[in-house]
Image (tube, grey):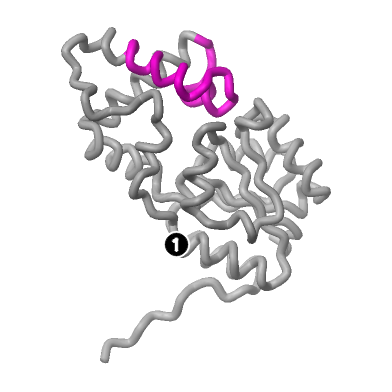
Amino acid sequence: MSAPEFIWFDFGGVLSPPIPALFEQYQLKTGLAPRVLQQAMSDVADELGVPMLAPVENALLTEREWGARLEQALRRRDPQIDLSRARLQGFGEQWFAGVPANAPLVAAVRALKRNGFRVGILTNNVVEWSLHWRAMVGLDEVVDLIVDSSQERTRKPDTAFFEVATARSGVAPQHSLLIDDVAENIHAAAALGWQVLHFTDNHQALAQLQRVTGVSLLQPAVEPA
């Protein structure tokens, strides 16, 4: 892998905590088990014939419309379900409340920018969630570009979404690097000629990124006193 000209970071699961952890935190807030919520999300998506989060990530539904359909789907499967703590029609605000960014990866974005690399965020996201997640990572003044599925009406792993990123950056696929935790997205980008880094954990990703860029990203271990 040669040093890329443009480095794209995924948001969910890379710049944020892992997706399973986010579902677990949402359960603590609402009482909704991840498998129950994910089933409802799938039910809503199946009605539209699209992947699980595409209804909001492609802006086919507003957050409010999606939340109302989630509630209906949950009650269809369990009429006695307790939704008293869930604010489904304002899902994003509750989902992101109290959630920290993945600080080591956010720091890596800043370090790469300081060292002359162009950096961006390539995210499947939701119109109404923009304020919450962008405030969480605090990179608006750092990144060169944010390409958001809900603005483009196409999402990873769709070819069209990667083509939008290429056009916006003006950087050819072979000089672009995607860091993403979803294997399907990694395979799709690689098939289009992108450089890819499949994120599995912070140390693995930072070590690989450090090797390919030459920028020091791994914090030295602190010796015990």
Name which residue lies at 32% across and 28% down. Answer: 87
The image quadrant where one finds the N terminus is bottom right
Q: Nearer the viewer, residue 37 or 138?
A: 138
Which stretch appears magenta?
A: 48-73
Residue 19 in picture, x, y percent from top left:
39, 41
Name which residue lies at 45% across and 21% down. Answer: 64
Name which residue lies at 71% across and 55% down. Answer: 144
126, above or below 16, in the image: above
Name which residue lies at 44% across and 62% down. Answer: 103
Query: For this view, does 119 lie left or right of residue 125?
Result: right
Query: For this view, does 25 lie left or right of residue 172?
Result: left
Q: Residue furthest bottom?
A: 225
**49 part of magenta stretch:** yes
Residue 78 in picture, x, y percent from top left:
21, 12
**Is residue 181 among what the camera can see?**
no
Q: Amino acid at mark 1?
A: Ala
